[in-house]
Image (cartoon, coloured by chain):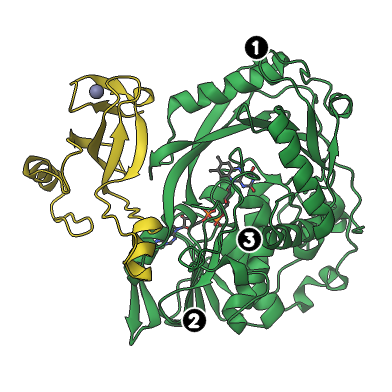
Chain colours: A green, B yellow
Amino acid sequence: MPEATFAGGAGQRCWSSYLREEDPDSTGDNARDENAMKRYSVFAVAREAARFHTGWEKAWKSPEPKKKYDVIIIGAGGHGLATAYYLGKNFGITNVAIIEKGWLGGGNTGRNTTIIRSNYLQDSSAAIYEKARSLYETMSQDLNYNVMFSPRGVMMLAQTQHEIRGYQRTAHANQLQGVETRFIGPDEVKKLVPIINIHGPRYPVLGALWQPRGGTARHDAVAWGYARACSDMGMDVIQKCEVTGIRTEGGKVVGVDTTKGAIDCDKLGMVTAGHIGTNAKMAGFRLPIESLALQALVSEPIKPCMDVVVMANTVHGYMSQSDKGEMVIGGGTDGFNNYTQRGSFHHIEETVRALVETFPMISRLKMLRQWGGIVDMTGDRSPILSKTPVDGIFVNCGWGTGGFKAIPGSGWAMAELMAKGHSPLTDEFSMFRFREGRFIDESVAAGVAH
Amino acid sequence: MLTLTCPYCGVSGEETEFHAGGEAHLKRFISGSTDAEFDEYMFLRENPKGVHFERWRHVYGCGKWFHAARDTNTLEVFGTYSAQVSEPPKEIKDKISAKRPGWSWRNFK
Ligand SMILES: Cc1cc2nc3c(=O)[nH]c(=O)nc-3n(C[C@H](O)[C@H](O)[C@H](O)COP(=O)(O)OP(=O)(O)OC[C@H]3O[C@@H](n4cnc5c(N)ncnc54)[C@H](O)[C@@H]3O)c2cc1C
Ligand SMILES: [Zn+2]
């Protein structure tokens, strides 16, 4: 068992990162290296409270780009930032720039519904998703940044006979993979989720696949925590800078053109989710990926009523309750290519209809906000972490509707791939697997977009 | 929400009346083709931010398949046309050129 044992639940936060012991240096601010970041702690909170919070410093720097870096990462979403973080932490590569056209975490990383689980079917998926889930357990401590990881438990409802068999199969696969899940009956579902309607008119709840250490985390904080740690290692997080071209010489990458000028690099990581097709085009190759809009919405805040995450794949919707009390709701992906970060109205109606059937008490709730992100879909619903036809260019994409949960594991694996040329965690996820007929079929595990 | 016009029955409807069918004008490569050709046909997809050509079906109408020319970045529909062609007709291309000078898509300009 991991050391972090803060039990999850709506309304409960993980304060553990504030409760770390004080950094011995932090009493003598002047004695410190000016550039080193100050640690967050309960003592820092007390100290700042005593001086009207005048001493908090910027969490990361905003540098101008240098002429050249060893590694450039395009995209300051969770996956790009985690890749940079582990390049530094695991391989000592810190002459790194992370280039972002908007603001960091402004892509899908700041738009998702934050479900974290690792109950996938195939071994290669279980390996990278469980690596990620286990890194989430200690991420707040590792980054000295509270990402509010809440392992409150994730439940995937079985509402047809077929789903029962499918989830029992997954539970068995997970047992062999060492991922802790089990199949539970309707009584246990009702006990864990009192607000659920077990005897629904169309699709009664027949059981569920239950992952007790799955849960949620604060999505923005994951991006911010990594950005702060990268900046502290001397890396440059460059926001409001769009990559507009990729320069190659003799089949090898030499740099990128950006809205802040040309920047050279030895290696390039493209980690741009929905925009990966535009990046690949700049570099002269294509990917088996299409970009679609996926939406989510939240209700007005209400008192704590559900302290687990529930996903209903047959009726197509899922829901959890945020620490603020909002019901966080997601559903299906639109059916056509789209870059507008705006989905179609009828998907909201379908999702809400399905959830009202499953959770009758939400029928009177007002919805507060709705938004969309552009998700990068592969044919087998598994990601691509791979070398490319261009020497020195690597891609990390195809996470589609479900990559938030994978951020730390993906960064860990991608850093190893970029530093060493291969990684046991990415070997199966090559972009060439389609041509070779080695699909990693997770369309069942990803029945609903999450 | 898209509004499309079926080129067969002439009915305009919003997107729930239709079904999206993916990239248009794919050339089929099967037995006897190279691995690269088959890979391209089967898996690789145009995924442009801008001008795009797609297949759609009028599922809750006449049931016919047809083609649509759209902008994936603005959701603007340039026009719809028959399924019985292997490249967009000239009037559709001209319409796109008027609004997006210099566009290209696969080998079409
Ligand atoms: C509504 C919704 C709900 C979701 N729910 C879940 C969930 O519950 N659980 C889960 O695990 N996953 C979920 N996901 C999926 C998850 O959000 C993504 O898989 C994940 O966040 C992808 O992270 P990323 O770092 O790859 O991409 P992003 O966070 O999108 O980052 C890519 C960045 O690249 C930048 N960029 C693009 N082009 C350029 C360029 N040319 N130059 C510079 N920068 C560029 C973009 O601005 C962007 O910030 C959901 C997604 C959506 C949209
Ligand atoms: Zn018709």
Residue B32 image position (x, y, % from top left): 31, 66
Residue A101 visible to the viewer: no
Residue furthest front as drawn: B31
Indicate whether A369 appears above or below A65.
Answer: above
Chain letter for mark 1:
A
- Alpha carbon separation for disc pair 2 and 3: 23 Å
* Disc 2 and disc 1 on one polypeptide chain: yes
Name the residue rendered at 49%, 50% in the picture. Answer: A377
Find residue A364 and name its label. Answer: 1
Instruction: Quickly name the residue at label 3.
Output: A58
Please give the residue where the numbered disc 2 appears in the rendered image: A69
Q: Residue at x 26, y 55 (%)?
A: B27
Q: Residue at the location (23% across, 58% down)?
A: B106
Q: How many marks?
A: 3
First along the sequence among labels 2 and 1: 2
Q: Element at badge 1?
A: helix
